[in-house]
Image (spheres, grey):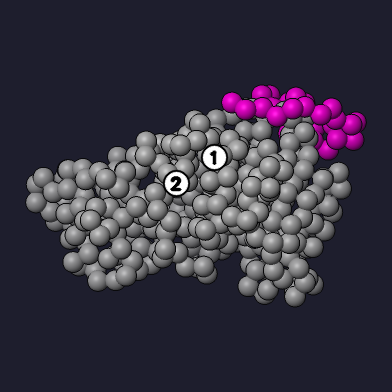
């Protein structure tokens, strides 16, 4: 499993992260690896807000955050880094402000645009790991292509109504997004029913997957797709196979 | 024989129910099960389960016995099987 470099902790950081450093196979070494790590989150909305907040709380060294547009009322049921006071102002400003309130030691790279083919390469270059929270499959496929090319891990998460999916892609080891969807879905509807508690649930899992991969402990969802439905709290892990003719990862 | 089709995401919304039990002939395959479902529910989402070549649409996740199927597969189903169909979902 990949492990990041290490950066030593200050006494204040040891105090802040004491409770999670008690996790036996994480410890101070895991915390040092987290401090030395950077994560790109593509769109910091319902899913990405929670991923970013949990990673900031856990002591990630740097977040690269890409999200365009201004805060709308319909963001506020799930995009937990947006505030009522910020309605009509750039989302990325609210995101940066809220994260630094929680963790002033956090290094932030705030990109006021969404990820696409034009900027995917440079943004992925700025991070050790990617979390894909984008609503459009054009963005998700651009990101998938780039993480495979740069051989960087990506946590892939999605939601609809009370249902969620999450998997962790380790290029060269696991299937990629194009193995799961050999063709880009055309029928996806941009706006859909969902609760903030649903996006929050999978956002927390995605943050934990990122922490595990970067720190080198635990058993990430490599080659498995976790699907669950909070309507009846049913969970299952499905085996995903790598496609030998995958147009993205078979040629990498 | 009876086979249960479990529906997720927009497919569930389109059919208005989380699952549908089909009566199929012994030896029926996944594609035949989907043809039965399409015949019973005429909607854009359900019609999109099969690709133009008659196989499983490459934008649908189908799982059987805990494994995601490749669109080229057409496994023979057995009485009591549950086939799960997930239409694509993303973030937001």
Horizontal and vertical percent for residue A249? Answer: 47, 39
Spatial distance from mark 1 to mark 2, Cα to Cα? Answer: 10 Å
| Mark identifier at residue A148 | 1
- Tell me which residue sits at (72%, 71%) in the image: A70
Horizontal and vertical percent for residue A72? Answer: 68, 73
Query: What's the chain of the residue with tag 1?
Result: A
Of A145 and A72, the residue lying toward us:
A145
Judged left or right of residue A119, residue B58 is left
- Tell me which residue sits at (30%, 63%) in the image: B48
- Quarter of the image that includes the C terminus of chain B: bottom right
Query: What's the chain of the residue with tag 2?
Result: A
Q: Residues within 10 Å of mark 1 (few under 14, many from 20)?
A: many
List the single residue furthest toward the left.
B25
List the single residue furthest toward the right.
A11
| Mark identifier at residue A178 | 2
- Tell me which residue sits at (24%, 52%) in the image: B55
Q: Is residue A199 magenta?
A: no
Query: Can the viewer see residue A201 in this picture?
Result: no
Q: Is residue A9 magenta?
A: yes
Horizontal and vertical percent for residue B88? Answer: 43, 57
Name which of mark 1 and mark 2 comes first in the sequence.
Answer: 1
Cβ atoms at labels 1 and 2 below 8 Å apart: no
Compared with residue A138, is residue A204 higher up or lower down, i.e. above or below? Answer: above
- Span highlighted in magenta in the image: A1-29
């Amino acid at each position: 499993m990949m492990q990041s470099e290490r950066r030593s902790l200050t006494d204040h950081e040891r105090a802040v992260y004491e409770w999670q450093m008690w996790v036996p196979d994480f410890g101070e070494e895991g915390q040092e690896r987290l401090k030395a790590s950077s994560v790109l989150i593509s769109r910091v909305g319902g899913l990405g807000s929670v991923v970013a907040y949990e990673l900031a709380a856990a002591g990630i060294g740097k977040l690269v955050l890409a999200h365009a547009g201004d805060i709308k009322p319909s963001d506020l049921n799930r995009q937990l880094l947006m505030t009522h006071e910020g309605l009509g102002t750039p989302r990325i400003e609210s995101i940066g402000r809220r994260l630094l309130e929680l963790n002033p030691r956090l290094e932030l790279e705030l990109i006021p645009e969404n990820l696409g083919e034009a900027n995917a390469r440079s943004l992925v270059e700025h991070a050790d790991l990617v979390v894909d929270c984008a609503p459009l499959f054009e963005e998700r496929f651009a990101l998938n292509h780039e993480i495979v090319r740069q051989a960087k891990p990506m946590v892939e998460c999605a939601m609809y109504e009370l249902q969620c999916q999450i998997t962790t892609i380790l290029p060269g080891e696991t299937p990629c997004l194009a193995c799961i969807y050999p063709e880009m879905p055309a029928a996806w509807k941009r706006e859909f029913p969902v609760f903030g508690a649903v996006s929050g649930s999978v956002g927390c899992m995605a943050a934990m997957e990122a922490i595990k991969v970067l720190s080198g402990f635990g058993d990430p969802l490599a080659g498995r797709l976790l699907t669950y439905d909070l309507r009846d709290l049913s969970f299952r892990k499905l085996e995903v196979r790598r496609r030998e003719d995958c147009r993205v990862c078979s040629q990498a | 024989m009876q086979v249960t089709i479990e529906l997720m995401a927009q497919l569930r919304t389109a059919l208005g129910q989380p699952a549908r039990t089909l009566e199929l002939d012994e030896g029926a395959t996944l594609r035949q099960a989907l043809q039965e479902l399409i015949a019973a529910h005429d909607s854009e989402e359900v019609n999109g389960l099969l690709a133009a070549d008659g196989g499983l649409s490459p934008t649908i996740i189908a799982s059987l016995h805990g494994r995601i199927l490749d669109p080229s597969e057409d496994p023979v189903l057995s009485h009591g099987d549950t086939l799960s169909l997930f239409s694509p979902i993303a973030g937001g």
